C-alpha cells in the first residue's frame, strides 16, 4: 500500500474526493487493501429516480463502478490509475432513493489488468451485482 497514491491521499484528507463520488453521496466505510476489498455507502437522492420512483440503473452501475475501482486503487502505487475497460451489471431488484451499501473486490490483478467484482445492497437485499475489467496505467 502506497500512501502517496491518489486513493490514499484522498483517504488521508490531503486531496478532495472525486466529484463523481460526491455526486453519488459516497462514504468509504472499510478498506482492506491487502485483501483487495472495499465497502462503501451511497446516498441515492430523489434526483436519481426513474419514472417508477426507483433508482435508475445507470446510477446503480456508477455506484458499483465506484466501489470496485477504489478497491483496486487502494492497491496501486503513486502515479498509477485504473480506468474501467468493461463493466457488466446485473440488476436483481429495484432500489429506492436512500442508502445503499456496496462491496467491491479485486479478484486478481497483474500484468496491467485488474479483474473486479462487486455487489450493491439496500438493507439486506441484493439489488445489483457486477464484474469489471480495469487497465492499470501510469499517469
Image: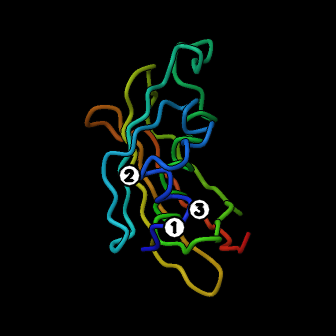
For label 3, the crowd category at 10 Å Cα-Cα, with few meaning under 14, some 14 to 19 and many 20 or more, is many
Question: Which residue is label 1 attached to?
Answer: 4
Identify the residue at image location x=34%, y=58%. Answer: 31
Q: 34 above or below 15? A: below
Question: Which residue is label 2 attached to?
Answer: 103
Residue farthest toward the front in the current orientation of the protein: 14
Dot 2 falls on a residue whose secondary structure is strand
Q: Position of residue 115 (x, y in %)?
A: 55, 71
Lower sequence index among marks 2 and 1: 1
For label 1, the crowd category at 10 Å Cα-Cα, with few meaning under 14, some 14 to 19 and many 20 or more, is some
- 125 sits left or right of 106 in the view: left
Q: Are marks 2 and 3 in contact (CB under 8 Å)?
A: no
Question: Which residue is label 3 attached to?
Answer: 132
Front-lying residue, 103 or 24: 24
Task: Report the quarter where the C terminus lies.
Answer: bottom right
- 105 sits left or right of 78 in the view: left
For label 2, the crowd category at 10 Å Cα-Cα, with few meaning under 14, some 14 to 19 and many 20 or more, is many
Amino acid at each position: 500500500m502506497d500512501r502517496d497514491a491518489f486513493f490514499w491521499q484522498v483517504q488521508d484528507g490531503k486531496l478532495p474526493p472525486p466529484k463523481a463520488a460526491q455526486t453519488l453521496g459516497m462514504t468509504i466505510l472499510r478498506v482492506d487493501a491487502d485483501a483487495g476489498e472495499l465497502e462503501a455507502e451511497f446516498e441515492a437522492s430523489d434526483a436519481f429516480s426513474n419514472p417508477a420512483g426507483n433508482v435508475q440503473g445507470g446510477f446503480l452501475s456508477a455506484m458499483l463502478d465506484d466501489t470496485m475501482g477504489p478497491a483496486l486503487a487502494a492497491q496501486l502505487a503513486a502515479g498509477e490509475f485504473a480506468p474501467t475497460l468493461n463493466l457488466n451489471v446485473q440488476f436483481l431488484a429495484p432500489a429506492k432513493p436512500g442508502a445503499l451499501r456496496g462491496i467491491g473486490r479485486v479478484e486478481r490483478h497483474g500484468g496491467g489488468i485488474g479483474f473486479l467484482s462487486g455487489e450493491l445492497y439496500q438493507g439486506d437485499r441484493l439489488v445489483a451485482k457486477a464484474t469489471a475489467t480495469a487497465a492499470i496505467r501510469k499517469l
